[in-house]
Amino acid sequence: MPQGQPIAVPDDGLTTRQRRNRPVLAVHTGDGKGKSTAAFGLALRGWNQGWRIGVFQFVKSAKWRIGEQTVLERLGRLHEETGEGGPVEWHKMGSGWSWSRKQGEEGDHQTAAVEGWQEIKRRLAAATYDLLVLDEFTYPMTWGWVDVDDVVTTLGNRPGHQHVVITGRGADPRLVEAADLVTEMTKVKHPMDAGQKGQRGIEW
């Protein structure tokens, strides 16, 4: 909340403005629905502030186009045409990262994840974006494809003013500890429990 008051004021030598404007590392985890949805909502909010948005979508097939991608890419084009909002880039793995000239092997997700993380590190170092959404990035860490300590160190040392949000189940405790904002989505009920499959507008 804009007018919300913090529970405690740390003795860190920073002014209220400096403390308020520090870049945030957020983690959306848990077994419930809404982790990615919340992250893309944050991207929409950032776009409205004129931020440079970079979305990096792990695990999901590159052939699966979700509704948020269509909306954010159209907003990116609106920025190009009118200057409104900010630029948007959307990259996803599955059949080759969008910056790679080679066509990735559909089954080689591990290699794609490693290459994707290395590219993200380069873009973090260059401060390419104001907000990075690393969607479903907890899974490559859980599976040992990407080193958690490297992620924590890289994000902790990122230059400039770059917000990062990571989504996915089972976030590693080291990532949770390093994050500024952690939300755990807890499932109470889901239509799939009653045998109902996903539907347009709700799941994608």
Image: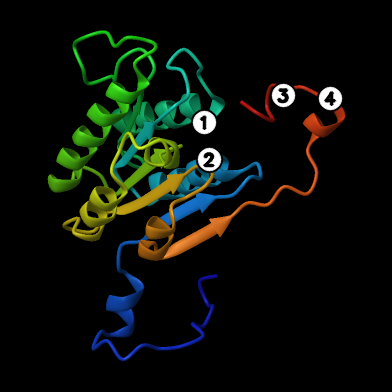
Q: Quadrant of the N terminus?
A: bottom right
Q: Which residue is mark 4?
A: 195
Work out how far the residue at label 2 is from the one at label 1, CA to CA, in angstroms. Answer: 10 Å
Residue visible at 52% across and 47% down in the picture? 170
Q: Secondary structure at mark 1?
A: helix
Instruction: Tell me, yes or no, whether the two marked residues, 2 and 4, touch with CB atoms within 8 Å.
Output: no
Looking at the image, tell me whether mark 2 or mark 4 is earlier in sequence order. Answer: 2
Q: Quick check: 54 left or right of 160?
A: right
Q: Which residue is mark 2?
A: 36
Name the kind of residue labelled 2 in the image.
Ser
Q: Secondary structure at mark 4?
A: loop
Work out how far the residue at label 1 is from the one at label 4, CA to CA, in angstroms. Answer: 25 Å
Instruction: Tell me, yes or no, whether the two marked residues, 1 and 3, touch with CB atoms within 8 Å.
Output: no
Give x and y (percent) for residue 190: 78, 38
Name the kind of residue labelled 1 in the image.
Glu
Residue nearest the viewer, comparing 36 with 51:
36
Work out how far the residue at label 1 is from the one at label 3, CA to CA, in angstroms. Answer: 16 Å
Q: Quick check: 157 left or right of 187?
A: left
The image quarter containing residue 31 is: top right
Q: Nearer the viewer, mark 1 or mark 3?
A: 3
Q: Which residue is mark 3?
A: 198
